Image (spheres, grey):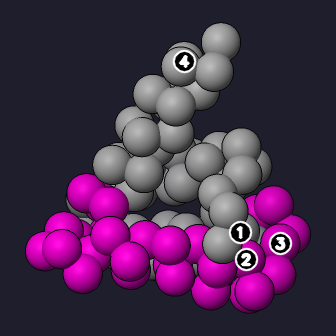
């Protein structure tokens, strides 16, 4: 799956809104419901993050890594 600007925006919002005692997955669900997006979006975002989680990262770390990679790539394109 290609990671779009909208996907990065959703992940960044999830990281900002996450409470200490709440999992990334739960907060992601809340963000998607607030934006009135489907469960399919949740599945596709988590699939991308789980690819990175295979290397010993948790969901938060994988999300931050994905965002930083995309921001670095965006700066290279400019």
Residue extending furthest top? 78
Q: Quadrant of residue 44?
A: bottom right
Q: Residues within 10 Å of mark 3 (few under 14, many from 20)?
A: few
Regarding mark 1 in the picture, which secondary structure is present there? helix
Q: To which residue does mark 4 refer?
A: 75
- Say whether residue 38 is magenta: yes
Regarding mark 4 in the picture, which secondary structure is present there? helix
Q: Are marks 3 and 4 in contact (CB under 8 Å)?
A: no
If the image is split into quadrants, where does the C terminus sit?
top right
Sequence-first tag of 1 and 3: 1
At a point 62% along the width and 86% down the height, the residue shown is 43
**Image: 74 above or below 44:** above
The numbered disc on residue 32 is 1
Q: Are marks 3 and 2 in contact (CB under 8 Å)?
A: yes
Q: To which residue does mark 3 refer?
A: 37
The residue mark sitting in front, 3 or 4, is: 4
Q: How many marks?
A: 4
**Image: 30 above or below 20:** below
Q: Are marks 1 and 2 in contact (CB under 8 Å)?
A: yes
Q: Residues within 10 Å of mark 4 (few under 14, many from 20)?
A: few
If the image is split into quadrants, where does the N terminus sit?
bottom right
At a point 59% along the width and 72% down the height, the residue shown is 45
Q: Residues within 10 Å of mark 1 (few under 14, many from 20)?
A: some
Q: To which residue does mark 2 refer?
A: 41
- Say whether residue 68 is magenta: no
Q: Residues within 10 Å of mark 2 (few under 14, many from 20)?
A: some
Report how far apart the C-alphas of labels 1 and 2 lie in the structure. 8 Å
* Magenta residue span: 34-62
Sequence-first tag of 1 and 2: 1
Residue extending furthest left? 56
**Image: 54 above or below 69:** below
At a point 18% along the width and 74% down the height, the residue shown is 55
């Amino acid at each position: 799956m290609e990671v779009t600007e909208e996907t990065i925006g959703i992940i960044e919002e999830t990281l900002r809104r996450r409470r200490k005692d709440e999992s990334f997955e739960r907060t992601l669900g809340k963000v998607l419901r607030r934006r009135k997006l489907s469960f399919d979006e949740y599945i596709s975002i988590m699939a991308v993050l789980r690819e990175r989680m295979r290397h010993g990262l948790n969901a938060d770390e994988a999300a931050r890594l994905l965002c930083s990679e995309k921001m670095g790539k965006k700066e290279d394109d400019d």
